[in-house]
Image: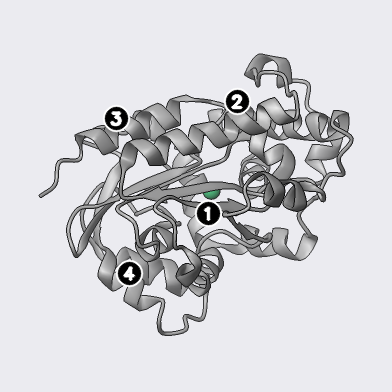
Amino acid sequence: MNDLSEFVEVSSKLGSDLSLVQAGGGNTSQKINSQLMAVKSSGTFLRDISLQKGFCILNYEDVKNYHDTPVDTETKYSKEINKFVQSGNGRPSMESGFHAIIPRKFVLHSHPVYLNVLLCSQEGKSILKTLYPDSLFIGTIAPGMKLSMKIKSIVNKMNDDICILFLQNHGLITASDNLESCYEIHKNISANVKKELSLPKFILENNQDIDPILFEKSLFPDQIVFSDSGDRDSDGFKENFAAANYIFVQINSSGLTPLFLKSQLIDYIRSMDSEKYRLNLKQK
Ligand SMILES: [Zn+2]
């Protein structure tokens, strides 16, 4: 089996940067051989991952092939994905589908607040196309099954050594066979957007006075998940709402227009079994 120590080290570094990952958000994977993949467990914090805990080993060939047959419901989808687990802790990340589908050894996914100023604004798509012409852009979609099926439909467009995928109202995916480049480009995109928009540093304590509109409207999926939790002292609530507040304030001060999630999508995300599982873990 391939060594997972570098993967674990980079995953925890990525997860320890609050501007990239808030609470249990974000997920990473390494394909170990032609069949097995290590992927972060659902609901665990990326910053807490170690060689002993925080990830599952699953058969990614089976996960990938499962997406060839149309799946019907989210509940069935997440149950089926769980069946491909060989070992590890808890359920695999609800995003295991796209980790299996993307044909690169390493896949890193995070929710960078600086980048999300663009991804959660109406003008962001065209700005990012100019800054990163070789990237792929995925319009607003529910995480989990729908996002993975969408990524499957564009996988043949991933021709570069390093793949960059922007997810509207959500975050960033980078993928490469080289872990160091994958991590560097991930961090660089976030830093570059911060510089381009002259954004101030994201500081949790400076974003505790949440704009009331963010309790009515949502910019990204994790904001919905944690607004439903009722526990405002949890890291999940504090970190995700500080991120939402920062993103909202910076969208406005950059002269951009906020792009909120539509109510239909919000209802759909609320109904997802995988999101309820994630939330239940937080409340324990
Ligand atoms: Zn995500």
Q: Say above or below: 268 vs 69.
A: above
Q: Which residue is mark 2?
A: 233
Q: Which mark is residue 63?
A: 4
Q: CA distance from mark 4 to mark 1?
A: 22 Å
Q: Which mark is residue 276?
A: 1
Asked if disc 4 and disc 2 are in contact, CB closer than 8 Å, the reply is no
Q: Amino acid at mark 1?
A: Lys
How busy is the neighbourhood of tag 2: few (under 14 within 10 Å), some, or many (20 plus)? few
Of marks 1 and 3, the one in the foreground:
3
Label located before the other in sequence (4 or 3): 3
Q: CA distance from mark 4 to mark 3?
A: 25 Å
Q: Which residue is mark 3?
A: 9
**Secondary structure under badge 1?**
helix
Of marks 2 and 3, the one in the foreground:
3
What residue is shown at x 37% (from left), y 49% (from top)?
176
**Secondary structure under badge 4?**
helix
What residue is shown at x 29% (from left), y 53% (from top)?
105
- Residue 151 is left or right of residue 261, and the answer is left
Label located before the other in sequence (4 or 2): 4
**Secondary structure under badge 2?**
loop
- Residue 272 is left or right of residue 55, and the answer is right
Label located before the other in sequence (1 or 3): 3
Q: Amino acid at mark 4?
A: Val
**Colouring scheme applied when the structure was drawn:** one colour
What residue is shown at x 41% (from left), y 76% (from top)?
67
What residue is shown at x 71% (from left), y 48% (from top)?
130
Q: Amino acid at mark 3?
A: Glu
Percent coordinates x, y for residue 126 in the rendering:
76, 52
